[in-house]
Image (spheres, rainbow, N blue to C red):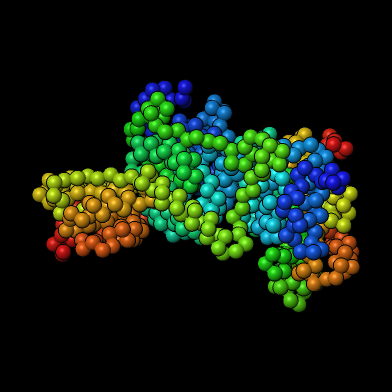
Amino acid sequence: MGVIQGTQRQFMTGNEVVAWAALAAGAQAMFGYPITPQNEIMHYWTRLAPEHGLRFLQTEDELSAGFATIGAALAGSLVFCATAGPGNVLMQEPISMAEMMRVPAVWVIQQRGGPSTATVIYSQQETRLTCFGGNGEGLRIVYSTSSHQDLFDYVIKALWAAWEFRFPAFVLGDGYQAKMREPVTLYDPESAGVNLPSVEPILKPEGVPSVDREPVHLRNTFNIEEELMDVLMGHIRDYLDMSSRVVESEEHPCEDPEVLVVAHGVVWRSAREAVSVLRDQGIKAGGFRPITLRPFPEESLRAAAEKVKLTVVVESAYGQLESMVRDRLYGLKVPVRSLLKPGVGVTAEEIVDSVIQFSKEV
Amino acid sequence: MADEQKVAKAWRSETKPHRFCPGCGHGIILKGLADVIDELGIHGQGVFACDIGCSLLSWDFFNLDSVQTHHGRTIPVVVGMKRVRPDLAVIAYLGDGGGYSIGLQHLISSAVRNDPITVILANNTLYAMTGGQMAPTTLIGQKTGTTPYGRSAEDTGSPFMGPEIVAAAAGDAAYVARGSVTKFAELKQILKKALLNQVQRSGFSFVEFLSSCPTNWRTKPADTLKFVNEDMAAVFPLKEHRVPEDLGVDG
């Protein structure tokens, strides 16, 4: 029986939702280092720890938290880590090892303003870092959440996906989501028919090395370039093969849309609202939200953008989502405009005004 | 095949001869480790993790499940393993650059927490894999790639005294010692205690071994031995800094 009986309607902060989601998914361990705005994930996890036999270590820095997360995952523990901002920058080092070694660990990223220390609440400036940080190819699964329900659903899903596909997985939120309270439905994933992670030791599976089985030898250093490329191309093939099973997007459709508003994460809430307002004003607007930023829902975005006369990208960053969208729309004739507000929130009214203005220009 | 009988179970013949340079101390430490793992009967519990630098060449040295990590980050990886699998005997193997420079915060923090792990560090006074740059352990006056006129204390400080500093940070439950690759019997005794302190007493162990790097020192065999036994030993005393009272010495 799960830790949550049936379904429970709750009113809580995003950080508390993350801790409950990890617990509901069966996570056994968390490693972390204090940084705002993710701190309360550690607070709630450590409060829940004694009753549920959970493990936690507050490490000496984010590097240590990330590498300890990797060690626990290799030892066969369903484990996660949480960080933000400059912590996410440091965390890219362990994450690059997780990418190379296919370590199934999960990171919750509560974005904050940047670059540098900056601010702690409203931002989407860790989008590119979370998707493509590190000296590699971005072989990661990244879910961008826009509500507390998303946080609950996608923490569970990220833990499952990491072990199912053996790529590091990420849940992207921000300080606004982390700190605010809103209603959420908690549920036991198993009785709700949601996939649960299937966990097994990667190092030290059954048997004694050289007695019952060959030893497991993991490395991330290679002697020759071709050896590396062979390994990496195998990872890339696996990544491309799993993509169709992982990509997710949400649309806010209307009949024969002429304008497509694209946003992710918490900004999607404003974008959705703006689309409704525009439709009330007689402008045929539709909305598109990539839920997975890696792999990106390219086909559904192109299908939606093909039908419109204008695409407008809105984000709390200066072109991080926009560049992903432009890349995916390459070859289509639809013009792309953007409302870019790095590190601050975007209101529905601002989006409405921008769309009306852009519509006059194109 | 009478010789086969003498090979430790943890010793992986398929990956021998090993990849270290002739005269390198790593092979001696790792040979001692394989012997001690067998003598203690912990082959089934052992997990080996190695750092970056020449220590990474040990990634498939043993018949043990092993993982090669990042520079300086081997300690947190084994800490993560041990936290979720306390039944394992986890070994972190690193060089002086990884342990005393880029990863020092992990070494000190782990000692303070008394993590039940065994950390083994090879001190060869420089960064060997990258071509012989100055390390925290480089002797005063020693020429390296980045101190071509000799290390100056005024400019870059004095050699880092690893076990002395770790012993000061660690509690009574820790085992902390320094040995040398030129004293193999003592090296094995030190390794034995460093592992026993983890599997019997759940204590933190840190051991440094003076090691040799004739490739970067540009020394002939006799001078290599002299550098370890005289020059290095004059700066880095071979001694046990912390020995828990109830640590079973004879295993």
Residue B86 horizontal side relative to residue A314, left or right: right
Which percent across, then down, holds residue A49? 55, 31
Give x and y (percent) for residue B221. Answer: 87, 67
Taking the view exactly as shown, the residue that stands out farthest to the front is: B1
Does the rendering let one see residue B103?
Answer: no
Q: How many marks?
A: 0
Residue projecting furthest to the bottom:
B149
- Residue at (42%, 44%) from the top-left corner? A171
Q: Residue furthest left?
A: A282
Side of A45 relative to B149 (left or right): left
Q: Residue at x 56, y 64 (%)?
A: A225
Say which residue appears at 74% left-offset and 42% top-offset: B204
Q: Is residue B194 above or below residue B138?
A: above
**Placement of A326 over or under A263, stated as above or below:** below
Position of the C terminus of chain A by quadrant = bottom left
Q: Is residue A134 above or below residue A3?
A: below
- Relative to residue A129, is residue B118 drawn left or right? right
Going by the image, does A50 lie left or right of B100?
left
Residue B187 visible in the snapshot: yes
Which of the two residues, A176 or A311, is positioned nearer the viewer here? A311
Give whichever of A356, A247 is nearer the camera.
A247
Rendering quarter of residue B90: top right
The location of residue A48, given as percent across then percent down, is 51, 30
Q: Residue at x 87, y 38 (%)?
A: B249
